[in-house]
Image (cartoon, rainbow, N blue to C red):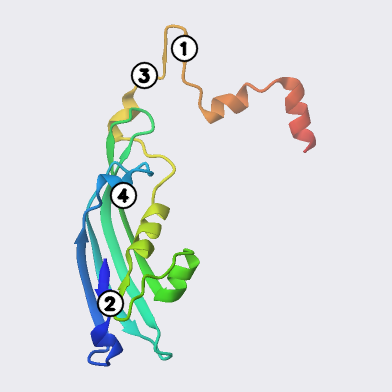
Amino acid sequence: MNIDLTVLKNNLSNKIDIDINYSFSEEELKSTEIRKLNNVSIKGIIKKDVLNNEVLDVRVKGVMILPCARTLKDVSYPFSFEINGEINKLLEDLQEKSKNFENSIDIFPIIWENILMEIPMRVVSDDASDLKTEGNGWKLITDEDENRNLNPELQKLKDLL
């Protein structure tokens, strides 16, 4: 996602419009739980602030495909977020070496880090709610069940705290 900054640096324009639809490859998604991430919409602008620093102001929308926590089936999870800030500071926060050449900058690390922060801890598909929770010799134990079945002596210790 290299953006040409020539018109901004030469004061030919006061902003650069960004309108990108990006599909992530399997290689980019390899170390995440995301199964698919296609047609992510990145819209916004890059402009100069009062101190002549490049400022990124974008809105990112998309749908990530994640595995269901119960069935491992694909679940669509929509996300949307905004990024506002000075590009060099955003890259610094990511501890990313800026690929800021004379007249271009790569905003991919900023976008990618924010997408990773949008991944939920777990997702459950709608059809997973009617799954069996007990059977012949087994039962699904939830957090509430686990707390109810505490040893009475340990319960007394919990009351002390």
Residue shown at 43%/90% (left/top)? Answer: 51
Residue named by callout 2: 45
Quadrant showing the C terminus = top right
Q: Are marks 4 and 1 in contact (CB under 8 Å)?
A: no
Q: Is residue 108 left or right of residue 121?
A: left
Q: Residues within 10 Å of mark 4 (few under 14, many from 20)?
A: few
Q: CA distance from mark 3 to mark 1?
A: 11 Å
Residue at coordinates 26% horizontally, 73% vertically from top-left?
3
Mark 2 Cα shell of 10 Å, populated few (<14), some (14-19), many (≥20): some
Q: Which mark is residue 132?
A: 3
Taking depth in this image into account, of 38 and 27 the one nearest to the observer is 27
The answer to whether mark 4 and mark 3 are in CB contact below 8 A is no
The residue at which mark 4 appears reads as 28
Is 50 left, or right, of 15 in this rendering?
right
> Does the image show residue 86?
no
Disc nearer the start of the sequence (3/1): 3
Give the structural element (helix, strand or loop) at label 4: helix
C-alpha separation, residue under disc 2 versus residue under disc 1: 56 Å
Residue 73 to residue 111: above or below: above
Residue 98: percent from left, percent from top: 41, 70
Question: Where is mark 1, residue-wise?
Answer: 138
Q: Amino acid at mark 3?
A: Lys
Question: Secondary structure under badge 2?
Answer: strand
